[in-house]
């Protein structure tokens, strides 16, 4: 998806999203190839940006988490998007771990826990509610 659709689904100020892209926190699926081409973003980038938004909401310096968010990009790309909602993310500035409900979910010191099922639900609802035209919305 292109940037406009990406930031609309994320429901975050586009300036903030551009800042995260410029800082390397959010990585496009494929960089533009040639004049007039645009970056393309996928659901992995969307989830990582949503996690960045959670960190921002906690008044955390998101750029300090760049190494962990890069790891998250890689971990999500290795898994089916159907599995993402099973995980909780345990995040420190230098590492990201995906924990399943069966894992030990006790919070470690200095880590932030993010429930990916909540993020997936929020982002999927915004995708399903895309306008159909003629003043109608999908349910």
Image (spheres, grey):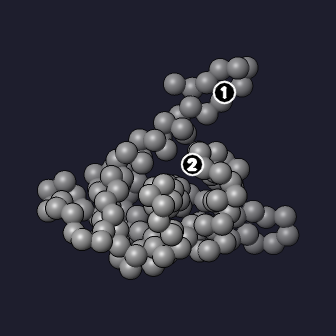
Q: What is the secondary structure assignment of the residue under circle 2? A: helix
Which residue is pictured at 48% across the width and 61% down the height?
A: 59
Binning the other alpha carbons within 10 Å of mark 2 as few (below 14), some (14 to 19) or many (20 upward) gives many
Residue at 35%, 73% in the rendered image: 92
Identify the image quadrant of residue 18.
Answer: bottom right
Mark 2 or 1: in front is: 2
> Which percent across, then down, holds residue 132?
66, 27
Does residue 87 appear left or right of residue 51 in this picture? left
Residue 16 in view, yes or no: yes
Find residue 97 and name its label.
none
3 up-or-down from 25: above or below: above
Query: Which residue occupies the foreground of this view, 136 or 25?
Result: 25
Q: Say whether residue 48 is visible.
A: no
Viewer-proximal residue among 79 and 92: 92
Is 120 left, or right, of 111 in this rendering? right
Secondary structure category for the residue under label 1: strand
Residue sticking out furthest to the front: 59
- Point out which mark residue 132 bears: 1
Q: Where in the figure is residue 20, as x and y percent of width and height?
A: 61, 67
Q: Position of residue 37 (x, y in %)?
A: 79, 64
**How far apart in space, not on screen, are marks 2 and 1 (Cα)?**
19 Å
Residue 10, labelled with which disc? 2
Residue toward you, 131 or 90 = 90
């Amino acid at each position: 998806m292109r940037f406009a659709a990406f930031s609309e689904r994320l429901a975050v100020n586009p300036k903030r999203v551009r800042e995260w892209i410029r800082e390397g926190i959010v990585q496009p699926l494929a960089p533009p190839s040639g004049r007039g081409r645009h970056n393309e973003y996928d659901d992995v980038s969307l989830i990582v940006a949503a996690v960045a938004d959670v960190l921002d909401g906690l008044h955390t310096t998101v750029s300090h988490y760049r190494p962990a968010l890069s790891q998250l990009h890689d971990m999500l790309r290795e898994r089916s998007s159907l599995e993402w909602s099973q995980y909780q993310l345990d995040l420190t500035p230098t590492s990201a771990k995906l924990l399943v409900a069966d894992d030990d979910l006790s919070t470690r010191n200095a880590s932030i826990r993010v429930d990916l099922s909540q993020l997936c639900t929020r982002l999927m609802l915004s995708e399903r509610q895309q306008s159909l035209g003629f003043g109608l919305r999908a349910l």
